[in-house]
Amino acid sequence: MRTRWGTCNVDKRRIWINLQLVKKPTECLEYVVIHELVHLLEQNHTHRFHALVEEYCPTWREAKKMLTTMPLDYMKKGETDTNGEQIDIGF
């Protein structure tokens, strides 16, 4: 299963970022933001799209690789957060 780290609505000129990125290295967040912003200039993953991502984020390949190899964090019902408080995840 692939993770959707970000999405871009070109018509409304909005991007959405997966909140799980806050737990990843800053380079990963930068890559995803740049990737989604470039969609405002080039809607599809064309050669021009990749050239623009490369221009603004030369290390995008490394960031993408980190994202594909790092698992998503998740919490099970009854687990506690870092303050020792029980998490209510609605299950």
Image (cartoon, rainbow, N blue to C red):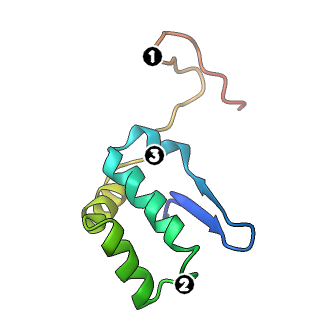
Residue 19, relative to residue 50: is it above or below? above
Amino acid type for the residue under numbered disc 2: Asn
Q: What's the residue at 28%, 68% (across, down)?
A: 61
- Decide: marks 3, 1 in contact (CB < 8 A)? no
Amino acid type for the residue under numbered disc 3: Leu
User: Foreground residue, 32 or 67?
Assistant: 32
As helix, strand or loop, the secondary structure at mark 1 comes to loop
- Name the mark nearer the viewer: 1 or 2: 2
Q: CA distance from mark 1 to mark 2?
A: 40 Å
Image position of 13 (left or right of 35): right
**Pointer 3 local density, CA inside 10 Å: few below 14, some 14–19, many at least 20:** some
Q: What's the residue at 49%, 72% (across, down)?
A: 38
Amino acid type for the residue under numbered disc 1: Thr
Image position of 21 (left or right of 24): right
Q: What's the residue at 55%, 30% (across, down)?
A: 76
Q: Which residue is mark 1?
A: 82
Per the rendering, the mark at residue 70 is none
**Pointer 1 local density, CA inside 10 Å: few below 14, some 14–19, many at least 20:** few
As helix, strand or loop, the secondary structure at mark 2 comes to loop
Residue at the far bottom in the pictured view: 47
User: Foreground residue, 34 or 78?
Assistant: 34
Task: Specify the quadrant of the image occupied by residue 24.
Answer: top left
Q: Sequence-wise, which precedes: disc 1 or disc 2?
A: 2
Q: Which residue is mark 2?
A: 44
Q: Position of residue 29 (x, y in %)?
A: 41, 51
Q: Sequence-wise, which precedes: disc 3 or disc 1?
A: 3
Q: CA distance from mark 3 to mark 2?
A: 23 Å
Q: Which residue is mark 3?
A: 21
As helix, strand or loop, the secondary structure at mark 3 comes to helix
Q: Position of residue 73 (x, y in %)?
A: 45, 39
